[in-house]
Amino acid sequence: MRALFLPLTCLALPAMADDIALSSSVSAVTLYPQGATVTREVTFSAPAGQHDLILADLPQGTPLASVRVAINGARMGGVTTRSDYVPPRDAPDSAALIDARAEVERLEDALRRAREDIADIELEAEAARARITFLGQIGQGEGTATMTPDQLRDLSNVIGSETLEARKAETTATRRAEAAKRALKDQIKARDAARQALNALVPEDEARAMLAVAITTDTETQGTLTVIYTIPDAGWQPLYDLHLARDSGALRVERGAFVQQSTGENWHDIALTLSTLRPSEQTEPGQIWPWVPRIEDPQEIQPMARGKAESAFMTLAAPMAGAPAADMATASFDGLSVTYSYPAPVSVTTGADRVRLMLAPLQTEAEIVAQAVPMRDPTAFLVARLTNDTGELLLPTAEARFYLDGRYVGQRWLDLIADGAEADISFGPIEGLRLTRLVTDRNEGDRGILSKSNQQTEAVEITVENLTGIAWPLRVIDRVPVSEQEDLEITWTADPMPSERDIDGARGILAWTFDLPASQMRKITLNTSLRWPDGKVLRQ
């Protein structure tokens, strides 16, 4: 950075005639799931001649190589950037920050005075205790032996009255000190709250980067300097509340976005656009490499562990390395990405705020079925089967919450659902639809990972029982084995036969669809048989 040269004698001093110091702030941001494009706009006035427009208030972490500059109202020359040896900037504090600091100082002064008052009161109590000690020692002196009874009586009265006054003074001072200490706790709480309020304002005290733009103008002019750059330390995350009405199948998707940034400066009243583009991730298609198989003698082939085999394949495939009514944003889809332009100015404090913005809700219709996977689950699950006809993408997110008839049923990851795509979305278990899957008969020769006989048969009985009190449309999913070798013969039968086969292109995945009335039970039997030549073994 030392090699950069800026024609300034001392920027800490007032700007010279041909240098124009400007103060800028973020005016607009396009926010991606990871990263952002930031726009700063600042107006300037310049007399005729050559000048340098100086911005010394860019965040120090600004990727200066990504900075792009545009000038309106003058001819632009060279652009110089600097992240080290930046002159100090005069950044005025906001009125809220000034008031918060003054309140902290006032409460701390009051706290000091209160502690001094407590110390004074404790001194009074200590003085009273010293008087009591002194009075107690008077009657023990040798001079009392020569005193007459009247003198002793008078001395005793004086000691008694003085001791009483001293004890009253000690008691009063002790009580005043205790009361002052109790009040001190409230003052400490008020001071701590004021400090917390001051810290919440997050003053921008981090070091800054500098930008110098050379301009030339033939006449006195007024213009606009626009600075655009991309940053990694910001992003947004979609969130969805999916509300399903079981009686009608209506699905309402209430949408929002969590916005955060850690750029080192606060964003005040910016124009915010959310984009689904991911410039921080892969932006070009992958590359494949020649596949050159070879043969070897059997003894030269060494078994490869599964993890190593997967690693070798990944190395072959990718050897090179390197994501009142509220204001709501409206969406725009250009075939590549969706952008949401928020209608109101947005403020986001650096490193602190996680701002939630509302997006316009979506509405669609779904078919409700009870989906059962007896091989994995003891109950069926309520699933909304839908086609995304909203005209927009539903983006992947971990912030998806599901509601059935107004009741919260859970939160989990939601995958991407493209416009026009079909999807199955679960809304929780149906505890009254009980599932069992029993292997009623199996013959597989020698048991173990390898089957040494040349035949294996299995009989399975699936039972679905409806204990909910209402009828349900059921979709039961199970599987049968599939063969990719001519010598391995697989046959299967089912009663009843499945309604769907090879679901979503997954071979051997079967589905049965039927209505199951209340208090009824339905059974499905599934028989499979595998045969292979003698001398071969079956690896499962």
Image (tube, rainbow, N blue to C red):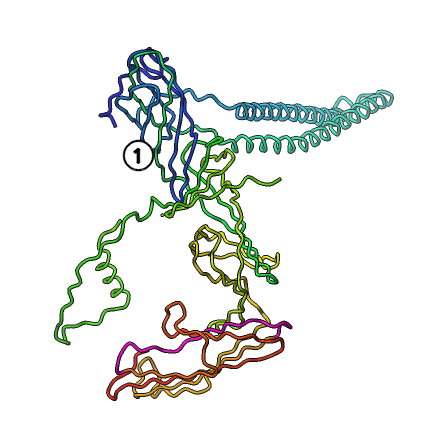
Q: Residue at x 80, y 21 (%)?
A: 146
Q: Is residue 94 left or right of residue 290?
A: right
Of the 4 image quadrants, the one containing the C terminus is: bottom left
- Secondary structure, magenta segment, majority class: loop
Of the 4 image quadrants, the one containing the N terminus is: top left
In percent of width and height, residue 532 lies at 28, 85
Give whichever of 98, 272 is nearer the camera: 272
Q: Is residue 259 above or below residue 375?
A: above
Write down the residue under mark 1. 66
Q: Is residue 294 left or right of residue 80?
A: left
Q: Amino acid at mark 1?
A: Ser
Q: Is residue 457 above or below residue 223?
A: below
Give whichever of 469, 212 is nearer the camera: 469
Quarter assignment of residue 156: top right
Q: Secondary structure at mark 1?
A: helix
In percent of width and height, residue 536 lies at 25, 84
Q: Residue furthest right?
A: 150
Q: Residue at x 31, y 49 (%)?
A: 282
Q: Is residue 254 left or right of residue 167?
A: left
In percent of width and height, residue 263 lies at 40, 35
Residue 264 forms part of the magenta stretch: no
Q: Residue at x 26, y 21 (%)?
A: 77
Residue 470 forms part of the magenta stretch: yes
Stretch in magenta: 467-487
Quarter assignment of residue 140: top right
